[in-house]
């Protein structure tokens, strides 16, 4: 729990640094670093001789003051590090030739970081890194984040990990990020390599396995399993967005949680040692992240899913919060641009809500369901003249704590807690929240795990056994159809105008 204040400071500082000048960030970094040093010095001076004798009864009050001042020093040091890194990023951004206030035209070479996605109006959005820019006879090498806004199928089907060159117009974006608009067709310098090549092969295999499935399940299977939404019809995508189910059409923490849960269940069923289960579970998460693609959003989803599964499996909310704080600290230092995205904020909020409130909520719901079922069963038996017993005890024999009651209450608890945790953030960002989102997430919850597990298995075995992969893909059709149907009903009930951020 001691990491939570430092993580909160790092998170808030990261959000603030993105909107201030580099000189301001540097000044704040110096001030907070001085405050950290002063707090540490005062902490040790307050105790006289430091932490060496802080375990006696006489110094118990000093212990508390020492820890408070030391925590203040850690928070100030964290803020200083984040501000310093933000200042360095901002200065590097301002020195970039593509970051001028006026648009420029250049021959730009980019490395594609993520699967392209279709935005409204037919615009293709691509997250990339600029590695080279040329103007006239001059060429500059660099490494800076950029967002490409293109049009045309040739841009929609560029693969993550490939290196592309095109003539583009540029303009300065938010954070240290550049906005690019191509004015020529993409020229592929090289294709995906390493993990990106593996992920591209897996996507191709899954698309092949999904061929022949009835529409729209053929497009929905790669979307729900690997986050490849390029074949999803625009109307279906709008239905998912309006219904609060858009997180299902992308790789989210739920996908990785299902893969991890299935792996741990199989290892537990086989009687493997606890250490072996943990190692294999961590390996399964790492393999899934590599297969989908080592994108920042996927790595964030993997971390959040692992924390949620750990919290639900052990019930140790304090340790889980410490893990969540460590993840926030790591992303704040290593990937501040990811921290400033709405998806990251929603993921942290949903994970924190699940860690803190999911287990108590599940126990309350399970107890309420068992009590209601006990009363119903008691009334039924008394009407039939079968038994005269206490209604509070009659249901204990009929519904096990590990039976359907627990499963249903867990589904409801997760949907309610995640929705309530993210609703204030969505409201604060001006996004409408569908009142039907909780009900529809509960309705599709039983269908999603099978799609994730069977779809991932189909993608993995498709090169060696294409017929088996097709069979696995066909087994996902009922679940995919149900999910698409619920999304359509939700769109009709909620209205197309609702802008619901479903990313968790």
Image: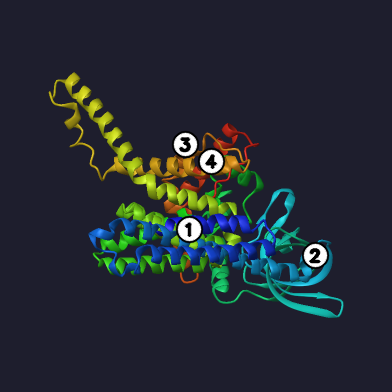
Residue 175 position in % (x across, y down):
67, 60
Q: Quadrant of the N terminus?
A: bottom left
Q: Which residue is mark 2?
A: 100
Task: Give residue 446's mark.
Answer: none
Marks 4,2: beta carbons within 8 A: no
Q: CA distance from mark 2 to mark 3?
A: 48 Å
Q: In which quarter of the view is residue 93 placed?
A: bottom right
Q: Nearer the viewer, residue 121 or 131?
A: 131
Q: Check the image and report above or below for 387 versus 218.
A: above
Residue 243 position in % (x across, y down):
56, 40
Q: Specify whether 349 is left or right of 113.
A: left
Pick whichever of labels 4 and 1 is earlier in the sequence. 1
Q: CA distance from mark 4 to mark 2?
A: 36 Å
Marks 4,1: beta carbons within 8 A: no
Marks 2,3: beta carbons within 8 A: no
Q: Which residue is mark 4?
A: 424
Answer yes or no: is residue 340 visible.
no
Pick whichever of labels 2 and 1 is earlier in the sequence. 1
Q: Which residue is mark 1?
A: 7
| Camera-nearest label, 3 or 1 | 1
Callout 1 environment at 10 Å: few (<14), some (14 to 19), or many (20+)?
A: many
Pick whichever of labels 3 and 1 is earlier in the sequence. 1
Q: Specify whether 71 is left or right of 152.
A: left
Q: CA distance from mark 2 to mark 1?
A: 33 Å
Callout 2 environment at 10 Å: few (<14), some (14 to 19), or many (20+)?
A: some
Callout 4 environment at 10 Å: few (<14), some (14 to 19), or many (20+)?
A: some
Q: CA distance from mark 4 to mark 1?
A: 20 Å
Q: In which quarter of the view is residue 368 placed?
A: top left
Q: Which residue is mark 3?
A: 439
């Amino acid at each position: 729990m001691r990491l939570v204040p430092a993580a909160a400071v790092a998170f808030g500082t990261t959000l603030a640094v993105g909107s201030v000048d580099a000189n301001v960030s540097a000044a704040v970094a110096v001030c907070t670093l001085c405050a950290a040093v002063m707090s540490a010095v005062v902490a040790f001076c307050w105790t006289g001789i430091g932490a060496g004798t802080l375990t006696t009864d006489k110094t118990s009050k000093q212990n508390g003051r020492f820890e408070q001042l030391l925590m203040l020093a850690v928070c100030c040091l964290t803020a200083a590090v984040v501000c310093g890194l933000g200042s360095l990023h901002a200065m590097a951004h301002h020195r970039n030739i593509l970051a001028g206030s006026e648009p420029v035209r250049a021959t730009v070479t980019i490395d594609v970081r993520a699967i392209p996605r279709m935005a409204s109006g037919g615009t293709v959005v691509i997250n990339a890194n600029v590695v080279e820019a040329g103007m006239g006879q001059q060429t500059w090498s660099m490494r800076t984040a950029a967002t490409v806004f293109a049009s045309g199928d040739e841009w929609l089907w560029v693969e993550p990990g490939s290196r592309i060159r095109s003539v583009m117009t540029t303009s300065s974006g938010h954070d240290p990020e550049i906005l690019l608009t191509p004015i020529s067709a993409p020229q592929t310098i090289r294709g995906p390599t390493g993990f990106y090549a593996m992920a591209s092969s897996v996507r191709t295999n899954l698309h092949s396995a999904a061929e022949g499935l009835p529409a729209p399940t053929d497009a929905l299977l790669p979307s729900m399993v690997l986050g490849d939404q390029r074949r999803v019809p625009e109307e279906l995508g709008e239905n998912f967005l309006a219904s609060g189910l858009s997180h299902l059409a992308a790789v989210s923490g739920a996908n990785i949680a299902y893969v991890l849960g299935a792996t741990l269940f199989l290892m537990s069923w086989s009687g493997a040692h606890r250490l072996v289960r943990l190692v294999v579970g961590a390996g399964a998460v790492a393999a899934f992240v590599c297969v989908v693609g080592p994108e920042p959003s996927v790595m964030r989803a993997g971390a959040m899913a692992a924390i949620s599964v750990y919290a639900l499996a052990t019930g140790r909310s304090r340790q889980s919060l410490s893990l969540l704080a460590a993840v926030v600290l790591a992303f704040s230092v290593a990937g501040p641009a990811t921290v400033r995205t709405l998806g990251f904020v929603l993921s942290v909020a949903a994970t924190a809500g699940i860690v803190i409130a999911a287990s108590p909520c599940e126990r309350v719901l399970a107890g309420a369901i068992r009590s209601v079922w006990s009363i119903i069963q008691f009334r039924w038996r008394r009407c039939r003249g079968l038994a005269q017993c206490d209604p509070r005890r009659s249901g204990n024999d009929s519904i096990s704590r590990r039976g359907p009651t627990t499963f249903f209450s867990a589904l409801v608890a997760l949907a309610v807690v995640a929705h309530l945790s993210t609703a204030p953030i969505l409201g604060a960002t001006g996004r409408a929240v569908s009142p039907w989102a909780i009900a529809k997430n509960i309705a599709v919850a039983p269908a999603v795990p099978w799609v994730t597990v069977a779809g991932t298995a189909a993608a993995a075995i498709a090169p060696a056994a294409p017929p088996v992969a097709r069979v696995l893909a066909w087994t996902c059709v009922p679940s995919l159809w149900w999910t698409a149907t619920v999304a359509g009903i939700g769109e009709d009930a909620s209205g197309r105008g609702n802008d619901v951020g479903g990313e968790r």
